[in-house]
Image (cartoon, rainbow, N blue to C red):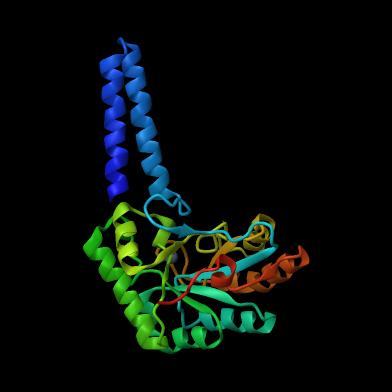
Amino acid sequence: MVKAVAIKLLTLAAIAAALWLAPAPLSWVLAGVALAAGLGVIGWAVFNVNSGIWARTLWRGDGDDKRVALTFDDGPDPVFTPKILRVLADKKVPAAFFCVGQRVEQNPELAKQIHDQGHLVGNHSFHHGMWINFSLHRTLRREIDRCNAAVAAAAGITPALYRPPHGFKNPALGDVLRERGMAVIGWQVRGFDAVVNDAARITTRVVDGARPGGVITLHDGAGLQGSPDRSATVAALPVIIDGLRARGFRFVRLDELLAIRAYK
Ligand SMILES: [Zn+2]
């Protein structure tokens, strides 16, 4: 929150200085530039999942090393999560699952299975609400704490990593995560598999787009938009794994890639 206030004050100071010091009409042009710059910084901080202005945000490991980490959002889903887990077991690939708290409450055995099979469980809020990223401290604390409590009840672990639904962040989220000692996980490349129901397009996007150290985002559950059918992700996953291995990439778990603690 402190940074948000600072950005607003700086913007207002720059506008005032422009209007005060420069002759018209130059003063109006400079004031407009200052306003646009201030709004630009705030927009980038809110809408870019990898911006670190509000909260500690990680999205890429060491770029010298051809390692990548798979992440899945929006589960656990009783139909698609087991299929994803089977592919990961067949291919011996570790992954991270950013789970929605209420879905963990509905499918606690799946959350436990994810953990028991050596994958990481992260926090993706309790409700995955459409407007969660416009919420303030009280709602965000409740969303994050309820999801962590659901994961703890199901699997006996308390996540320290959070992925904001839709990838947006606000200054209040930064405060809440600092209080909780948690970090945000962004992504280097995503399959857009929550909206594109086409295995070939998802595969091409990820295999061509992944860079050394990259965090890859896919979905094992239904988000709020698009189809709840994740068959395309299930079909794409083995091809993505083989394709990236053919490019010389090695899969490691997210916390190993980023050298960060997964749980409290
Ligand atoms: Zn999501």
Quadrant location, the C terminus: bottom left
Residue 123 point in image, percent of width and height: 40, 72
Residue 148 point in image, percent of width and height: 35, 77
Answer left or right for 218 relative to 157: right
Q: Tell me which corner region of the image, top left, top right, bottom left or bottom right, holds residue 91.
A: bottom right
Q: Nearer the viewer, residue 98 or 127?
A: 98
- Asked if one can make out residue 161 in the rendered structure from this viewpoint, the answer is yes
Residue reaching furthest to the left: 138
Residue 73 point in image, percent of width and height: 48, 69
Q: Tell me which corner region of the image, top left, top right, bottom left or bottom right, holds residue 109.
A: bottom left
Answer left or right for 110 relative to 103: right
From this view, report whether residue 15 is shown above or below residue 52. above
Q: Residue at x 36, y 42 (%)?
A: 42
From this view, report whether residue 90 is shown above or below residue 181. below
Q: Nearer the viewer, residue 42 or 202?
A: 42
Q: Residue at x 74, y 68 (%)?
A: 245
Q: Nearer the viewer, residue 133 or 130?
A: 133
